[in-house]
Amino acid sequence: MGRKAQAREAILSAARMLFWRKGYGAVGVDEICQAAGVNKGSLYHYHRDKTDLACAVIESNAAVLFENIATNLAERAPAPRVLGYLDWMIAGQVSEGRDSGQFAGCPFGKLAAETAGQEPEIRAAVLAVFQKLIKFIAAALRELDPARPSGEHRARAEEIFMSWQGALVLSQTRNSQQPLRRCRQATAAALADYAPK
């Protein structure tokens, strides 16, 4: 990896962690540059502004997320596929809680909640990730019970996804993994109930 690529990755890595731990509004460009070990010129060479950087962070996070699904989960049966994603997500939250002392919540959801009314580009980028995750869940539900109408798969997938987001917020608020563990149990039960008896 060349020096320019290293600088770009350092900026993304620093912004990713700072946005996740501290929030978008609490982090300035100077702090990102300091954490990345670069000057402002380097940051603005790759990103026109902080909004553009946040969108790049979302894109980078999403690439890791969906690569994990494609590489490690795609060949699993429907319920283990969805639960495997949830296990991976919970493991990341637990690791962050251990490293920083604080459960950080959903890196996508935090950006959306903080900026949705002011930063339409960020909102659109997060929504695209959320829609893709809902499709991932809906596809598993369709495999579990192909006889149900497609709209039912989508509606149930949205309900499951909303429960994940709620658990992430509660986990962050309580600084505990227990809401995530309970959410996993509830998701497993929902998947089991969805399959025809």
Image (cartoon, rainbow, N blue to C red):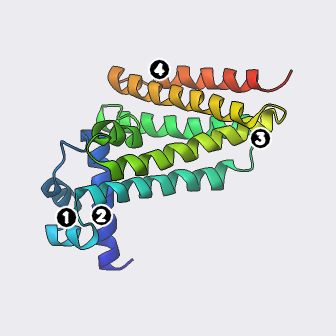
Numbered label tally: 4
Give how far apart the Cα atoms at labels 1 and 2 are: 8 Å
The correct choice, above or below, for 155 with respect to 51 in the image is: above
Q: Amino acid at mark 2?
A: Ala
The correct choice, above or below, for 165 with respect to 33 in the image is: above
CB under 8 Å between callouts 2 and 4?
no
Residue in the foreground of this view, choosing between 96 and 73: 73
Give how far apart the Cα atoms at labels 1 and 3 are: 44 Å
Q: Amino acid at mark 1?
A: Gly
How many C-alpha atoms fall within 10 Å of the one at disc 1: few (<14), some, or many (≥20)? some
CB under 8 Å between callouts 3 and 2?
no
Disc 4 target residue: 178
Left or right? Give the position of 171 relative to 77: left
CB under 8 Å between callouts 1 and 3?
no
Residue 7, position as x, y percentages in the image: 28, 70
Give how far apart the Cα atoms at labels 3 and 2 are: 37 Å
How many C-alpha atoms fall within 10 Å of the one at disc 4: few (<14), some, or many (≥20)? few
Disc 1 target residue: 37
- Residue at 55%, 23% in the rendered image: 183
Disc 2 target residue: 10
Res 71 label? none
> To which quarter of the image does residue 152 belong?
top right
Disc 3 target residue: 77
Q: Which residue lies most toward the bottom here?
A: 2
CB under 8 Å between callouts 1 and 2?
yes
Label 3 secondary element: loop
Q: Earlier in the sequence, mark 1 or mark 2?
A: 2
Give how far apart the Cα atoms at labels 2 and 4 are: 33 Å
Give how far apart the Cα atoms at labels 4 and 3 are: 26 Å
Label 4 secondary element: helix
Q: From the viewer's perspective, is the residue at label 1 or at label 3 nearer?
A: 3
Quarter that holds the N terminus: bottom left
